């Protein structure tokens, strides 16, 4: 039985460092000159939708994960590609952002492509050479350079993949605890997972365990973790409770707690955090990352807000809600710029570049 591959396999162990990126970047690497106007939505029905937010036009929509019992989709985008997972699927899918065509489907234990397994569900042959999840996927995240994709599943595994080749680079497991959220650090050398038992796990290069922040971090599952884009050791986490927490992952110490719930996202400059209001879960709050002071409260959704994402330049914030809409806000003034009516719960949002 071959041991699982270790991340990263490249000789250049700092491949994600912006200063060390090749002159001719990977097709997955985002060009900074592209305009931040593509908005990707992961829907409760299992669908994935890509909008041109600047003109409010749907470029494409696919029924990505509609054939499963638990159909909720989560999405991420890097350069020319959109990645999605469905909570009832055991594999990830990479889509061409321009056309919506399938570019690649991640490995799975289904008796094909070198797999020697015969399922029932979760039954995997010990000698199978295929590295893949054995249960549904809850989370995904691209590395900052776009060359790696991390996925977390109900099987307790987190796998880091080479997004271009589809090859698994590392598989790590932590006591069969499912990872509900994932985030790479800004330099791509660390990966954090927010877990179902309320804990947070941080891995270093090679899949080596760096730190575990115990279950007292949150009394409920950690549905959101996000590294600061400007600070490699600063992490914010959120769950279904009444507080989000900012951590120094180097020491494992909590820096501060802030009123908020469901999700927590740093702005691109690391100065602001977006989260859902505790008093009014249908509102989106922007808070100061250093002081925790409330900066703006954006009101307009008619039901709980589950997700939010800043545009690449930080000028806009998109939020997704149970009310079946995605709203786009001016992140400086709080003005509502656009409402995209989808008709089903918006589980996940991500901005891209074009």
Image: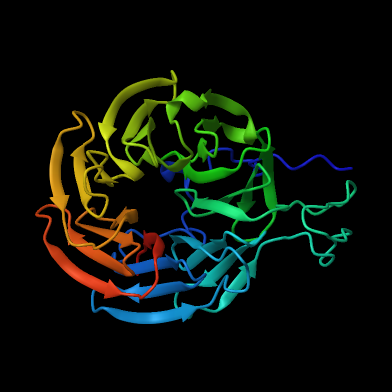
- In the rendered image, residue 159, in percent from the top left (x then y), is placed at 64, 46
- In the rendered image, residue 339, in percent from the top left (x then y), is placed at 23, 71
Tell me if I can see residue 148 in this picture. Answer: no
Query: Which of the 4 image quarters holds residue 287?
Result: top left
Q: Is residue 210 left or right of residue 111?
A: left
301 or 62: nearer the viewer = 301
Q: Residue at x 56, y 31 (%)?
A: 204
Applied colour scheme: rainbow
Q: Is residue 162 left or right of residue 248?
A: right
Location of residue 240 with respect to 246 vertically, above or below: below
Q: Is residue 131 left or right of residue 48?
A: right
Location of residue 199 with respect to 268 vertically, above or below: above
Q: The C terminus is located in which quarter?
A: bottom left
Q: Residue at x 61, y 66 (%)?
A: 69
Location of residue 235 with respect to 50 vertically, above or below: above
- In the rendered image, residue 1, in percent from the top left (x then y), is placed at 89, 42
125 or 203: nearer the viewer = 125
Location of residue 53 with respect to 296 vertically, above or below: below
Q: Is residue 105 left or right of residue 20?
A: right
- In the rendered image, residue 128, in percent from the top left (x then y), is placed at 87, 52
Q: Residue at x 52, y 46 (%)?
A: 180
Tell me if I can see residue 316 in this picture. Answer: yes
């Amino acid at each position: 039985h071959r041991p699982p591959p270790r991340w990263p396999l490249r000789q250049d162990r700092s491949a994600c460092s912006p200063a060390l990126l090749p002159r001719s970047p990977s097709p997955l690497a985002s060009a900074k000159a592209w305009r931040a106007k593509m908005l990707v939505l992961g829907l409760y029905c299992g669908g994935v939708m890509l909008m041109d937010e600047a003109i409010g036009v749907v470029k494409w929509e696919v029924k990505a994960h509609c054939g499963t019992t638990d159909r909720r989709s989560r999405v991420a985008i890097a350069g020319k590609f959109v990645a999605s997972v469905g909570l009832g699927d055991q594999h990830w899918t990479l889509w061409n952002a321009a056309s919506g065509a399938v570019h690649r489907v991640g490995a799975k234990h289904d008796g094909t492509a070198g797999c020697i397994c015969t399922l029932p569900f979760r039954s995997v042959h010990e000698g199978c050479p295929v590295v893949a999840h054995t249960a549904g996927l809850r989370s995904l995240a691209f590395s900052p350079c776009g060359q790696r994709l991390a996925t977390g599943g109900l099987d307790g595994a987190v796998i880091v993949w080479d997004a271009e080749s589809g090859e698994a680079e590392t598989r790590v497991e932590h006591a069969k605890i499912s990872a509900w959220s994932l985030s790479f650090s800004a330099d791509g050398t660390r990966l954090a997972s927010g877990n179902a038992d309320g804990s947070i796990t941080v891995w270093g290069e090679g899949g080596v365990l760096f730190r575990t922040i115990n279950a007292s971090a949150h009394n409920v599952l950690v549905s959101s973790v996000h590294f600061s884009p400007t600070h490699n050791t600063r992490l914010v986490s959120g769950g279904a409770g009444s507080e989000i927490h900012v951590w120094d992952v180097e020491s494992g110490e909590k820096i501060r707690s802030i009123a908020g719930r469901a999700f927590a996202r740093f702005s691109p400059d690391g100065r602001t955090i977006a989260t859902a209001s505790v008093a009014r879960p249908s509102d989106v709050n922007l808070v100061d990352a250093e002081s925790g002071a409330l900066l703006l409260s954006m009101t307009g959704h008619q039901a709980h807000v589950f997700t939010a994402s800043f545009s690449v330049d930080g000028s806009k914030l998109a939020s997704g809600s149970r009310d079946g809409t995605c709203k786009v806000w001016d992140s400086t003034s709080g003005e509502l710029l656009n409402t995209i009516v989808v008709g089903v719960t918006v589980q996940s949002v991500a901005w891209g570049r074009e």
